[in-house]
Image (cartoon, helix red, strand yellow):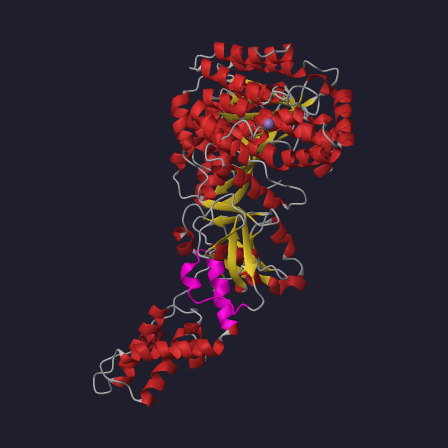
Amino acid sequence: MDTIDNKEFEGIQKILDVIEKSDKHYDIEKIERAYLYAKALHEGQFRVSGEPYISHPIAVAEIVTSLGLDTDSICAAFLHDTVEDCPDKTNLDIIRSRFGDDVAMLVDGLTKMKVINVEDKEEQNMENIRKMLLAMSKDIRVIFIKLCDRLHNMRTLGVKKDHKRRITALETMHVYAPLAHRLGMQRIKQELENLALSYLDPIGYEEVSKDIEKKYGQNQNFIENTRAYVSEKLAEYHINFTLEGRVKTVYSIYRKMFKQSKSFDEIYDFYAIRIIVDTELECYTSLGIIHELFKSIPGRFKDYISTPKPNMYQSLHTTVIGRDGIPFEVQIRTRDMHHVAEYGIAAHWKYKSGEKSKEDIDKKLSWISKLIDTENAAIDTEDFMHALKIDIFSDETFVFTPKGDVIALPQGSTLIDFAYAIHSEIGNKMVGAKINGMIAPIDRVPQTGEIIEIITSSSSKGPSRDWLKIVKTSEARTKIRQWFKKEKKAENIRIGMAEIDKILAGFRIRPTDAQKQEIIAAASKRIGMKEPEDLFNAIGYNGVAMTKVISKIKSEYDRVVKPDEQVIPTEAEQVQTKPSKKIRSNSGIVVDGEYGCEVKFAKCCNPLPGDDIIGFVTKGYGISVHKCDCPNVLEGRKNPDNADRWIQCEWDNESVSSLDAGKSLYEVVLQVYAENDIMLIANVTTALADMKVSLLSINTKKRTDTDIIINLTVGCKNIEHYHSIISRLRAINHVHSITRGFS
Ligand code: MN
């Protein structure tokens, strides 16, 4: 029987403990077999630290188990290094016969995921590497296990050689931590970042750690105390909430200090609490409660609920001063918003490039979300497996250059597309290609993970015209056309002339030479070519659609060759007789009777449709439109030097009303004078939400001990809309008055 040391025993025991406590089904016998098989294979191998090698797979399996992954993932974690490190004792086929297809597939995925060099790569290439890793691991479990493997390697990196350490830390920082982030594995992401930083910049890491210790060391229980206090107050308002607290990691503070060059004292969100509630209204109510309990730091309030971030993130953020004078950030959102915040980035990234429906992706991401929910480990593993086997990252192919750069190509791209994606000269001089070192036909579609080498020759005669039919990307097509346009003019012209002859030969009566010349000259002009030669050339290099050429030649033929019949006005003549279309400005402003002038709305008074307005001709920035009664106008018109720059303006009512609702919003600043009340902000924002008015910014200012001013910027359609908003806000309890614009 194999020997088992204490540490090993502890690791296995921890795995069994988690499994025992879980209500999911595990095949313990299979897990045990995987462990014993891995142990036998790695027998006699040691880590750099001197420990038996099996300690590493055990540790990885332990992390994998703690994430709530299934039996096959745990087995694969035990076996993940065996195929590569013990080639004389085992291989994928043996693993498949002992542990089944899934375990073999996972081990295979993990074995392949090793070859990437991130040194001196640009950010774009890093992004491609990340995407490629996702695409390569057809099953998302491969990535999860890989992240656990990396985490353990990072935890034990200290013993490795310096250069090797640096490379591993770089790769972790630029590839694996972002992947963990994208998959919503916040805890693993943070640990990876902190560990990587401690190797990449040990001095900076130490410095930040000391700052934290110095400033916050004595406040170990700050978050706990604050949570308890806030919970008690929220409970009084009968809000159904979840409260989370967090302390910022060394790495995230380091980033702020060094990337945004802030001093340690400028970091206000070292501590943060998050309040998750059921409804949007409760978000604002909670905000009111927080502002009542703590003094807020001006300029730190952000309403991402009314104005979501581009990645769909929604939340209210504010920073307040807690007891002991320690600032902390408060994030408030609904459970739905929280879900998007945790997994939305991955979702959004996919929406941009894929054709798959949102529901489809949500479904898949919800599996991921359940998987990483370690507090609530109830995952239906069976369903989970099937849902995630489908590759959700499949519309791009990622291939390597021989130098190890990763190139992303649209799915279905050929080797020719790849060559042109590298450089047009590579494409133009391409004579062949190799995939993973083997000669391959140039119209082959490469697969993710393959290494592509393009063979070029200086004696190449350039691309073939057939390539235009083979290539998938418009980039390659354009570059090939450009080459023909430039290099093969004589040949293009010959081809173009032959094509036109073919068209003319198809007509009933053959035109005379003179008629032919007339037809071609007229058709060329109508297609937008100066000379017939340009048209021939364009036909030759595929620079013009043949359907267009045929239709124009046909209509000119009809005009020129049938003099006896009634003259039908040509298309061109018809177009000319149409009345010219009135071009309307998209700003909705008529300046001195002219439409389409470049205008901008003055920020001092934010005019609305319906307001009396006047324009001021600026130097180089178009016409600035003000309200007639804007103080700046009243003042400005006193200056005789500028008298001729004031210009009459009016609203183009037709244009304003025809714009679609989303675009025809104008910013309006409102100042609400009110008596301070805990529900005030919630009431104001709810009223706006009820009216579907978009809130662009909100901040408050203390006026007296009892009174405050709320500055609101809202989106408003016109003056009537403005009046309806005002009268609704005036009806709110404690509101004294409302003024428009800044005072
Ligand atoms: Mn490993």
654 or 319: nearer the viewer: 319
Tell whether 631 sits left or right of 339. right
Q: Is residue 585 above or below residue 183?
A: below
Look at the image and say whether residue 166 sits in the magenta stretch.
no
Magenta span: predominant SS is helix
Q: Quadrant of residue 652?
A: bottom left
Question: Which residue corresponds to the image point at 62% horizontal and 62% vertical from the top-left?
Answer: 620
Pinpoint residue 500: horizontal percent, then vertical percent. 35, 78
Question: Which residue corresponds to the image point at 42% horizontal and 81% vertical from the top-left?
Answer: 532
Tell whether 284 sits left or right of 637. left
Q: Is residue 442 above or below residue 69?
A: below
Pinpoint residue 342: horizontal percent, then vertical percent. 52, 29
Question: Which residue corresponds to the image point at 55% horizontal and 36% vertical from the top-left?
Answer: 113
Pinpoint residue 90: horizontal percent, then vertical percent. 52, 27
Q: Is residue 286 visible?
A: no
Which stretch did the figure color magenta?
A: 460-486
Question: Which residue corresponds to the image point at 40% horizontal and 34% vertical from the top-left?
Answer: 390
Tell whether 67 sits left or right of 520. right
Image quadrant of ligand 1?
A: top right
Q: Is residue 236 above or below residue 345?
A: above
480 or 692: nearer the viewer: 480
490 or 87: nearer the viewer: 87
Q: Quadrant of residue 5?
A: top right
Look at the image and say whether residue 471 sits in the magenta stretch.
yes
How many numbered callouts?
Answer: 0
Give the quarter of the figure containing the N terminus: top right
